[in-house]
Each structure stands twice: as C-alpha cells, then as structure tokens.
Amino acid sequence: GSCRRCLRPAREQVLSRKEQNQRHYQKNKEKIAAKQKEWRDKNPTRFAYLIQKRHCKERGIEFLFEYDEWVDWWGEDFANRGTHQGQLVMARHGDQGPYSPDNVKKIMSTENVSEAHEIRREQMTETLKS
C-alpha cells in the first residue's frame, strides 16, 4: 500500500473547480478587477445588455432579446436610457410576460413607475372584491 505521506499531495490537489476559481480570484483580485473594468470600458453597449439580461434573471423574468436585436431596438435612444427622471426604459406591456421585441415599449421612467402603481392598485382592488 501507499503511505499517507505519499497520498497527501494528491488529496490537496483534489479541489473542486469552484474552490480553484475562488483561490485564483483571491490571489488575483486586483488584476481581475482591472481587466473587467478595461473590458467594460471597451464594450459599454455589450455590458449594458448583459446587465439588463442579468437583472431580468434576478427578477425571474424571461429576457428574449439577442444582443443585436436589443441594440437595434434601442437605436438612437440608447444614450437616453436609464431609470432617472427624463430617461427612457424598456417597459413590458401590462408589466407582464417576458422582455421580448413584441412585448416591450420605450417609455419615460416616471411613466413606467406610474403604470406599475396603477397596475398594483387595480390588483389590490380586485383582491378586495373577492
């Protein structure tokens, strides 16, 4: 048989892929952050697309736009998109369903908030009636 001393290095090498990634990230945190920032700075449109896609996933809402489709949909309004007053948002019709080309519209962020409040009021009224 093998002695424990001979087996120890092999046991230490058996790290999960997740553990390997975590160790690598901890050792190279600053370098990785700098590369990520560099990529974001070079690819602001792609980064904005990925952020919106991620936010939809976090909210449990399907996002069915391909990158080129999303860029075309925003068109010249891309620079005016955002969640602050006076900016445009991609809003779903009736605040339901997926983010898809046939289920979204461009509206001012304040209008989107007002629509959402109105929908919630209607839902509460329906709930109280039943």
Image (cartoon, helix red, strand yellow):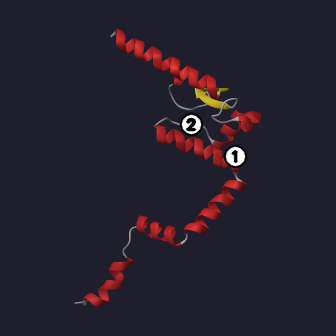
Horizontal side of 51 relative to 62 (left or right) equals right
CA neighbours of label 2 inside 10 A, class few (<14), some (14 to 19), many (20+): some
Give x and y (percent) for residue 82: 66, 36
Q: What amino acid is labelled 2 in the image? A: Leu
Give x and y (percent) for residue 110: 62, 25
Q: Mark 2 and mark 1: span between their CA atoms? A: 17 Å
Horizontal side of 21 relative to 12 (left or right) equals right
Circle 1 sits on which residue?
45
The residue nearer to you, when weighing 48 against 27, is 27
Circle 2 sits on which residue?
64
The residue nearer to you, when weighing 105 against 118, is 118
Which of the 4 image quadrants contains residue 10?
bottom left
Q: Is residue 83 visible?
A: yes
CA neighbours of label 1 inside 10 A, class few (<14), some (14 to 19), many (20+): some
Horizontal side of 38 relative to 21 (left or right) equals right
Task: Tell me the residue at 69%/31% (across/down).
Answer: 87
Task: Tell me the residue at 64%/31% (across/down).
Answer: 89
Name the secondary structure under disc 1. Answer: helix
- Which of the two discs, 2 and 1, labels the residue nearer the N terminus? 1
